[in-house]
Image (tube, helix red, strand yellow):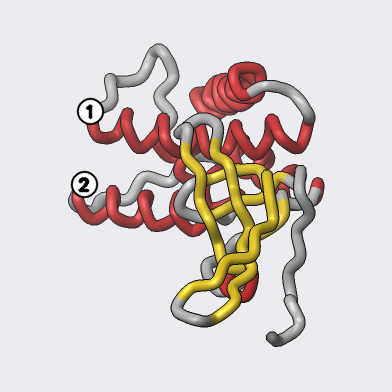
Amino acid sequence: MAAKALSFDVGDYVVYPKHGVGRVIELQSQEIAGAKLELYVLRFEKERMTLRVPTNKAESVGMRKLSSSVTLREALDTLKGKPKVKRTMWSRRAQEYEAKINSGDLVSIAEVVRDLFRADDQPEQSYSERQIFEAATSRLARELAAMEETDEPRAQEKILDILREAAAVHAK
């Protein structure tokens, strides 16, 4: 078997692009179709889901360690920026937002959160906008919580505080 480029230990928090932050709970060896396979067993508490990822596929599926503090700072700074509202059809924008969320890239997820945030004095969001906003915010909050060793509601409140502050600045 080739040397593993990525290695995660039991107990490590990892980011799986399609599902967000999970924790390595076990390293397993299984024999499938006569081939011995090493697997990371990931647990996603929020979804109550367990996922097995072959160790040799971890990199190709985009599994990664938690972001660096530099990337986190960049993502939080992104939230402070002025929202970019594209004038394309909602279905196309929704696809772009979903792609950014599923990329697992923290800064891209922060862009979605920033662009879909609505301050109290702004018009209501549509149901689908709200769904995507909540998915992106939750994904960002889970990684923030894991990095700052806090819980998701606190991390979410921190994100919303940054967004409210930025909205007040941009409204002037």
Q: Amino acid at mark 2?
A: Trp
Q: Secondary structure at mark 1?
A: loop
The mark tally for this picture is 2
Q: How dense is the environment of label 2, judged by Cα within 10 Å: few (below 14), some, or many (20 and up)?
A: few
Q: Residue at x 53, y 38 (%)?
A: 139
In depth, the one of 41 and 167 nearer the eye is: 41
Q: Quarter of the image holding residue 147?
A: top right
Instruction: Depth check: give the residue in front, 48 or 150.
Output: 48
Q: Which mark is residue 90?
A: 2
Instruction: Of the two numbered discs 1 and 2 on the same chain, state the one appearing first in sequence.
Output: 2
**What is the x, y in percent for residue 89?**
18, 51
Where residue 99 sits, quadrant-wise, is bottom left
- Image quarter hosting the N terminus: bottom right
Residue 76: where, in percent of width, then height? 67, 38
Q: Residue at x 55, y 61 (%)?
A: 53
Compared to residue 57, the image places residue 95 above or below, namely: above
Q: Give the residue furthest to the bottom.
A: 2
**Residue 7 location in percent, x, y?**
76, 65
Is residue 165 visible to the viewer in this orientation of the structure?
Answer: no
Where disc 2 sits, the SS reads helix
Q: Is residue 96 left or right of residue 89?
A: right
Label 1, label 2: how far apart the Cα atoms are: 10 Å
Identified at 23% across, 54% down, the residue is 88
Residue at 23% of width from left, 56% of height from top? 92
Q: Amino acid at mark 1?
A: Ser
On residue 126, which mark appears? 1
Kindly tell me whether residue 36 is visible in this rendering. yes
In this rendering, the answer to whether 18 lies above or below 63 is above
Residue nearer the viewer, 168 or 130 = 130
Q: Looking at the image, which residue sits at the far top?
A: 120
For the residue pair 102 and 72, the one nearer the viewer reads as: 102
